[in-house]
Image (cartoon, rainbow, N blue to C red):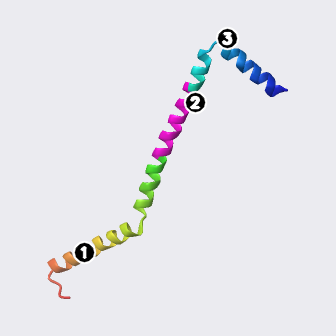
Amino acid sequence: MQKLIVILLAVIVVLIAPWTLAVLFAGVLAYGIWLAVVGLITAIFVAGYMYKNSEGRRQRRIQKVVDAANKRNRSQGMKP
């Protein structure tokens, strides 16, 4: 019964002031856009975190340190 009363009140409000429906749709649209933006930003951060901690990146970082150490050792005249 309460649902019926709420629906009837909503119909009456829309009939009396049709612009209320437009305002409601604008609010729903704004909320949807906000959710899309937050979702996109979250996806970018998650992708960045996954890239930062990826195994390939870890291997490249290790190789960079090894190459720098080898270059240092060669420049100091150490023999292999």
Nearer to me, 76 or 24? 24
Residue drawn where x is 45% and y is 51% of the image: 45
Q: Which label sits in the foreground, 3 or 2?
A: 3
Q: Which residues are magenta?
A: 26-41
Q: Earlier in the sequence, mark 2 or mark 1?
A: 2
| Residue topped by disc 2 | 28
User: Residue at (71%, 19%) from the top-left corner?
Assistant: 11
Q: Earlier in the sequence, mark 1 or mark 3?
A: 3
32 over 63 or under it: above or below:
above
- Height in image: 31 above or below 23? below
Relative to residue 62, is residue 28 drawn left or right?
Answer: right
Can you say whether 9 is above or below 29 in the image? above
The residue at 17%/80% (across/down) is 74
Looking at the rendered structure, the kind of residue marked 2 is: Val
Circle 3 crowding by C-alpha within 10 Å: few under 14, some 14–19, many from 20: few
Residue type pointed to by label 3: Ile
The nearer-to-camera label among 2 and 1 is: 2
Secondary element at tag 2: helix
In whole angstroms, how far apart are the C-alphas of marks 2 and 1? 56 Å
**On the image, numbered disc 3 is attached to which residue?**
16
Q: Earlier in the sequence, mark 3 or mark 2?
A: 3
